[in-house]
Amino acid sequence: MESFKFDLNAIRVNSEDDFVTEFLKETGDLEVRYPKKQEFFRVHPDEQMRIQTKLLLIDADKKWYLVAKNVWPELSDELTAVTLMVCINDDGVQFLWPMKVSPQGQSNGWNDSALNGATKAVTRWVRLVADITRGRRRIILGNENLPEPEWEAATLSDMIQKAFKDTYIDSLDHHVLKKLRGIL
């Protein structure tokens, strides 16, 4: 077995400012979530930073699971069709938004207004706020003079791998699916 020697200088922080900035931006998981009602956000302008897929939301822990296509037929009633898009909030924190997609030919005020907000968020800072009475999201536009976001230099594949590293289902033997089927 080949020995591995790691250079600690390659990861050492040189000042307190470097530590705080880098720690906040680079550690932790990439969240998979909806935009929060009190944050402005942007959607990555590159269409390559979006993908249509199906996810499984486990209500008990409010976690989204990425599901491989070979498992979709077994979970058809449990899956949610989404456009998974890279977003960034007004604090510079990136996240993946699983924006629900309405079935073809069907309209849904919540999904339609989310799509409208996402479209606007490509070029403007946006907030989405639930409007329960009207059954949709209200779109609040930020000031046009707000600075452009600084996007992480990563591919969509890299971001998805980071976000779903512990929540990827690629077989029926996955513990979450066993629990759903009453096997565990």
Image (cartoon, rainbow, N blue to C red):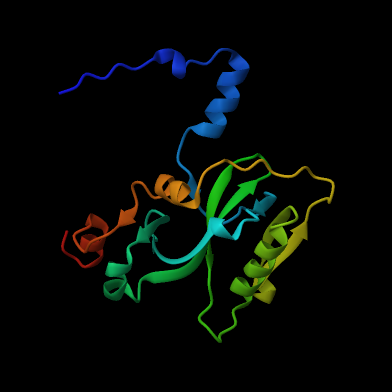
The residue depicted at 50 percent of the width and 48 percent of the height is: 155
- For residue 87, side relative to residue 53 (left or right): right
The residue depicted at 35 percent of the width and 71 percent of the height is: 78
- For residue 138, side relative to residue 19 (left or right): right
The residue depicted at 58 percent of the width and 41 percent of the height is: 152
Q: Where is residue 96 in the image (x, y as percent from the top left)?
A: 52, 53
Question: In which quarter of the view is residue 17 placed?
Answer: top right
Q: Where is residue 76 in the image (x, y as percent from the top left)?
A: 34, 76
Q: Which of 10 and 84 is in front in this view?
A: 10
Count of numbered circles on the image: 0
**Above or below, comparing residue 139 to residue 21 in the picture:** below
Position of the N terminus, as image quadrant, is: top left
Q: Where is residue 163 in the image (x, y as percent from the top left)?
A: 43, 48
Q: Nearer the viewer, residue 128 or 170?
A: 170
* The residue positioned farthest toward the front in the image shown: 2
The residue depicted at 20 percent of the width and 62 percent of the height is: 178
Q: Which of 42 and 137 is in front in this view?
A: 42
**Above or below, comparing residue 32 to residue 17 in the picture:** below
**Above or below, comparing residue 61 to residue 113 in the picture:** above
Q: Position of residue 119 (x, y in %)?
A: 68, 64
Position of the C terminus, as image quadrant, is: bottom left
- For residue 76, side relative to residue 159 (left or right): left
- For residue 64, side relative to residue 103 (left or right): left
